[in-house]
Amino acid sequence: MKERERIGKRIAELRIEKGLTQARLAELSGVGYGHIARIEQGRYSVGIDTLGKLGEALGVELGFKPKEQ
């Protein structure tokens, strides 16, 4: 799985856990609805600023962690 697919899947998981629609996440983050759909599908390479907006809207911090072995 490509990194953008993995990240997109995680964003979708977090959004669903929070009970948000893609449209509501778009409103909260200021990121276009169409972009969110493409990000979640792993079809769009997203910049750190956009990831930051999504993270803030989802109530999570961005960060790096060691890979699980």
Image (cartoon, grey):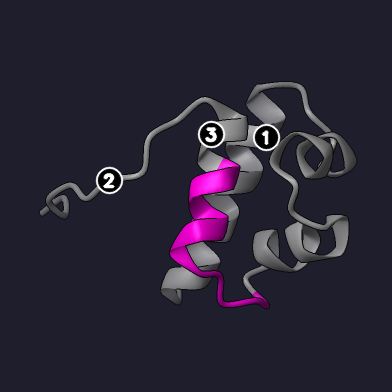
Q: Nearer the viewer, mark 2 or mark 1?
A: 2
Residue 13's x, y, as percent?
61, 39
Residue 35's x, y, as percent?
77, 65
Residue 30's x, y, as percent?
75, 47
Depth order, front residue of 12/30 = 30
Residue for point 56% across, 70% down: 46
The answer to which of marks 3 and 1 sits earlier in the sequence is: 1
How many numbered callouts?
3
Q: Quadrant of residue 21?
A: top right
Dot 3: element: helix
Question: Badge 2 is on which residue?
Answer: 63
- Left/right placement of residue 51 relative to residue 42 reads left
| Number of residues whose C-alpha sits closer than 10 Å to that of mark 2, classed few (under 14), some (14–19) or many (20 or more) | few
Give the residue type at disc 2. Answer: Gly
| Number of residues whose C-alpha sits closer than 10 Å to that of mark 3, classed few (under 14), some (14–19) or many (20 or more) | some
Q: Nearer the viewer, mark 2 or mark 3?
A: 3
Residue 45's x, y, as percent?
56, 77
Question: Badge 1 is on which residue?
Answer: 15
Question: Badge 3 is on which residue?
Answer: 56
Q: Quadrant of the N terminus?
A: bottom left
Residue for point 50% across, 58% down: 49
Q: Which mark is residue 40?
A: none
- Left/right placement of residue 23 relative to residue 37 reads right
- Left/right placement of residue 23 relative to residue 62 reads right
Identify the magenta region: 43-54
Q: Nearer the viewer, mark 3 or mark 1?
A: 3
